Amino acid sequence: TNEVDVCVKECMLCEKGNRSNQDNLWKLHIRPNGSFYCFRCSKKGGLSDLKKNFDRFSNFDGSTSQKWNAEDSTTSNGILDGQNLSLSYVIPEQSRMNSYQENLFPTISFTEQPRSNNGSEVNRKKVLQYLTSVRGLSEEVLIKYSVGFAMQQFLSDEKKTWIDHVCVTFPWMRLWSENATEIDDSDEDDKIDLPDETEERTTATLMTVRMKFRSLETKGLQRILPKGGMWGFFGWQTVDAATQKSIVITEGEYDCMAVWQALQLLPIEDPLRNVPAISLPNGCNSLPVDLTPLLDDFTKIYLWMDYDKSGQDAAEKFARKLGINRCVIVKPQEDAKVIPKDANDALRQDPKVIPLMLRQAKTLTHTNIQNFEDLREGVLQAIRKTREVGQHGWQATSLSKLTDICKGFRRRELVLLTGPTGSGKTTLLSQLSVDFAKQGIPTLWGSFEIKNIQLVQQMLQQYYKQGHLNSLKDNELEKVANDFDALPIQFMNFHGPTDITKTLEIMDSAVYNDDVQQIIIDNLQFMMPMSSASSSSGTKQGFEKFEYQDLVIYQLRKFATERNVNIILVIHPRKENDLFPLSVSSIFGTAKATQEADLILILQKLKGVVSLDVKKNRYDGEVGTVAMEFNPTIRCFCPKAGK
């Protein structure tokens, strides 16, 4: 064992042969929260799946019972929803968390202390009017879910200033049983200070572990505090896992409140009336593996994601993560007069639609053979999506012409990028990854050529865009860094030559644990062997190098398809005359790379003029050139004026 996982010598779930071979041992990892993953056979699941598959684990008690007392704790560090934890997490001051709800509903008082000045009457009425009149939510449901509001500062895109935004607050809650020290996060700079006294808890307490702040006027502006906090579900206060065996999980906060509100209109004897509704912490982009054990006791899980490509892809992914036998996917009927995009839309159309859609929810199909009826919804949805916005996938927002040509970056696609040395390939990908992350796309970087500190420094500058970071004061720089820290970007901790097997293991883990959707690998040459000990001649060694490159391409192509992710891979070009533009045939290696790729991008740099050529586009066949110029101050490629 190590500090993180328990490693099992032989995975009995592997259907492949030769399980006992030395290279196949110690591939099954069991995490502290009970979830497991095998890096050989890719089998995965939660604690309940582990119990079913391993009889020897049948006596292991890892239940998530909500009735915990102090004597249940085996350590002084505490128990959270049945999981032993260390105090490495930041626990916010509960009175401050409660104050946000008091801002919205002044008649509710958790303490005798005066409310913060965030609760101006003008802002209160503005927020309440939006939630009730626009979103159609009742005050009862808002109080039930502890919704509030507060002020937060966000950086203006147009000016080098921080602007106050009225934000709706959504608490992430979990049950807590411990002798814990609360942490006061009330400092304006979000610094964490320990108070002089501690508050002891001897029984289970419903606690806010983090708070999400979402701008009322600009949905894309949001912040999650405190930093260093743990994951939780919005709406967990509606859950009693000891008595409830079904649960609804929605993509957004407004959706789960809409579901709960509609179900309260059902007769008392209706089983659906008592089904709790919660929402994912960060929309359809992730279901943190730390939260999956909380759902182990539920025998039926309704997954209600937005009715778009991203939402439906996420529903399928989460169903496989939680167990397809107990998950049902909620979708509107194709013959409906008006198709609601999400649960909140359904509430505003007619509350009766919500229980109807829940009753019609279906499980995923197991078969590997499909007919048109199986594909019908996805096909029509894709056509509508393209017809409405002309795009499909996440966008290169800083280079709109690139999006216009390739229509976005999509799951299950392999993208190749090449360009001469020093043309800015890493800089361009750094810029694009910031674009993706700002859209909420979890992104994993594998930078084998440039160290992560240099890469992130460049990203931070590209994220700021208002001038050089050196011109900022320390407190301003900290604010920019805090906002950047909220982006879902992770980095492989590798530098220099790295074995492809190890790289795939890290990618696999990131996709399962963090729901990574975009992977960037810079570059292929660093996954190639430096030499071949078995080679007897240079010619043979050259053939082996090409064969190995084809193998790497095959493995990445397969990974993108099977793990439902987008992979961007940098490949250096052949040594050619730099007076002429590169072409598809300039890409180093055999033709396999260009054959397997769905999208090929070539960064051209001729006589100081920079452009990006889209040379292959399997999605719709459109190709073209993006004229660009480089801004050294903000380290970004920008559309060339007049182009």
Image: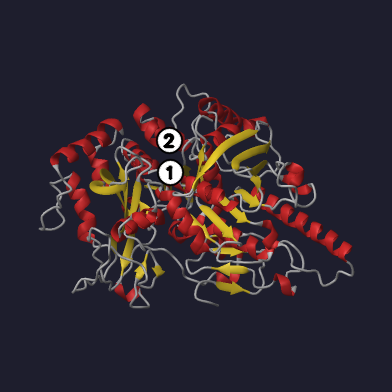
If you read the primary sequence from the N terminus, does the residue marked by circle 1 or circle 2 appear first?
1
Residue 251: numbered disc:
1
Residue drawn where x is 48% and y is 58% of the image: 456
Horizontal side of 71 relative to 590 (left or right) equals left
Residue linked to disc 2: 342
Assess whether mark 2 and mark 1 are in contact (beta carbons under 8 angstroms).
yes
Work out whether residue 311 can be spotted.
yes
In this view, the residue in front, 602 or 342, is 602
Q: Position of residue 86 (x, y in %)?
A: 38, 73
Circle 1 Cα neighbour tier, 10 Å, few/some/many (<14 / 14–19 / ≥20): many
Q: Position of residue 274 (x, y in %)?
A: 35, 45
Q: Is residue 154 above or below residue 344?
A: below
Q: Secondary structure at mark 2?
A: loop
Residue drawn where x is 74% and y is 62% of the image: 16
Alpha-carbon distance for marks 1 and 2? 8 Å
Q: Secondary structure at mark 1?
A: loop
Residue drawn where x is 43% and y is 59% of the image: 294
Q: Is residue 568 above or below residue 351?
A: below
Circle 2 Cα neighbour tier, 10 Å, few/some/many (<14 / 14–19 / ≥20): many
Q: Position of residue 390 (x, y in %)?
A: 54, 28
Work out whether residue 240 can be spotted.
no
Question: Within the image, what quadrant is residue 469 found in?
Answer: bottom left
